[in-house]
Amino acid sequence: MMSFSIPHLLVFLAVVVLLFGTKKLRNLGSDLGFALKSFKKAMNDDEIELKKDNK
C-alpha cells in the first residue's frame, strides 16, 4: 500500500502549478465555487418546492 506524505503532495502541487499556471487554477477554483453554490441553491429550491406541495 502506498501512502503520500507532505513532501509528495508539495511536489505534486508544484508540478500542477507549473503545468497550468496560477491564473488557470484561480479561474478553475472560482468556477468550481460557482458550480457548488448553484448546486446548493438548486437543491434548496427543490426542497422548498417539495414542502409547498406537501402542504
Image (spheres, rainbow, N blue to C red):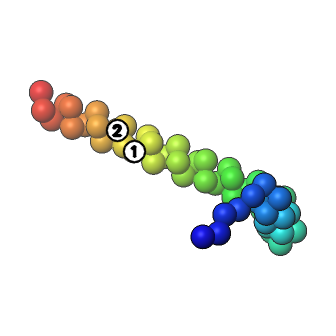
Residue 54: tell me if it is visible: yes
Q: Is residue 11 left or right of residue 41?
A: right
Question: Residue shown at 30%/42% (left/top)?
Answer: 46
Question: Residue shown at 83%/59% (left/top)?
Answer: 7
> How many residues crowd around disc 1 within 10 Å: few (fewer than 14), some, or many (20 or more)?
few
The quarter holding residue 28 reads bottom right
Q: Give the total of numbered labels.
A: 2
> x%, y% of residue 41?
44, 40
User: Which element is circle 1 on?
Assistant: helix
> x%, y% of residue 37?
52, 43
Q: Nearer the viewer, residue 50 or 2?
A: 2
Q: In what quadrant of the picture does the N terminus appear?
A: bottom right
Q: Is residue 13 left or right of residue 45?
A: right
The disc label shown at residue 28, or none: none
Dots 1 and 2: beta carbons under 8 Å?
A: yes
Q: Is residue 5 above or below residue 43?
A: below
Q: Amino acid at mark 1?
A: Ala
Residue 21: tell me if it is visible: no
Q: Nearer the viewer, residue 1 or 7?
A: 1
The disc label shown at residue 45, or none: 2
Cα–Cα span, label 1 and label 2: 5 Å
User: Which element is circle 2 on?
Assistant: helix
Question: Residue shown at 61%/53% (left/top)?
Answer: 32
Q: Amino acid at mark 2?
A: Asp
Residue position marked by numbered label 1 in the rendering: 42
> How many residues crowd around disc 2 within 10 Å: few (fewer than 14), some, or many (20 or more)?
few
Q: Is residue 32 above or below residue 20?
A: above
Question: Residue shown at 19%/31% (left/top)?
Answer: 52
Q: Is residue 7 above or below residue 16?
A: above
Name the outermost residue toward the top. 55
Q: Is residue 39 left or right of residue 11?
A: left
> x%, y% of residue 49?
25, 37
